[in-house]
Image: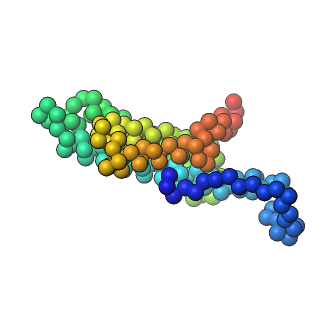
Amino acid sequence: MHSSDTGEISFTDMFVPDDALLGKEGEGFYNISWELQGERLIGAAGSIAGARRAFEGALAYAKERKSFGKPIGQHQAIRHLLADMATEVEAAQQLVYTAAWKVNKGQYPVREISMAKLITGEVAWRTIDRTMQIFGGHGYSMDLPIQRGWRDSRLIRIGGGTDEVMRDVIGKMEGF
């Protein structure tokens, strides 16, 4: 993403006086864990927004673009892609709502946030990939924002914890 300034920072022989420590020494990751959950939930919500925007663009295009004398959205293959996109986006959005509702109630729903991040990243990727398929070669061009969404949608599946990390968190919380 153009707005993600990602980089590695390392300090060698860095001295931090005791009165400047935030929390206890060696517990930094533990102390930022809640912030990491917030990043994941915000990322999940952003993924849904991106997926919904892509779906709406694909739907509008499928209604206006014609082939064989009718809008392409009336062809079964395109209609099925749109139906799958709509269903997946709605289902993933409900997981985000559930996680946000629990946070709002003062809970610490790591399981639900991890599930929401995992599924929304995958759904956003599939939705935008299908949108590109519906637009054909034109969707891949730099003239449309679809190609940008296609590239940007990949970040949520890496940033804030990869899909594999989310699966591991969920698996441990489920007891396996």
User: Could you say where residue 111 lies in the image, as x and y percent from the top left?
Assistant: 62, 43
Residue that appears at 31% across and 49% down: 143
Residue that appears at 81% across and 62% down: 23
* Residue projecting furthest to the right: 18
Please tell me which residue lies in front, 132 or 100.
Answer: 132
- Asked if residue 24 lies left or right of residue 133, the reply is right
User: Could you say where residue 45 lies in the image, as x and y percent from the top left?
Assistant: 49, 52
Please tell me which residue lies in front, 141 or 67.
Answer: 141
- Asked if residue 162 lies left or right of residue 27, the reply is left
Residue that appears at 35% across and 41% down: 140
Please tell me which residue lies in front, 12 or 124.
Answer: 12
Q: Which color mode does the image show? A: rainbow
Q: How many marks?
A: 0
User: Could you say where residue 104 lies in the image, as x and y percent from the top left?
Assistant: 57, 59
Residue 161 vertical placement versus 79 (above, below): below
* Residue projecting furthest to the bottom: 19
Where the C terminus falls, by quadrant?
top right
Residue 170 appears in the picture as rendered: no
User: Could you say where residue 79 lies in the image, as x and y percent from the top left?
Assistant: 27, 34
Residue that appears at 17% across and 38% down: 66
Residue 138 appears in the picture as rendered: yes
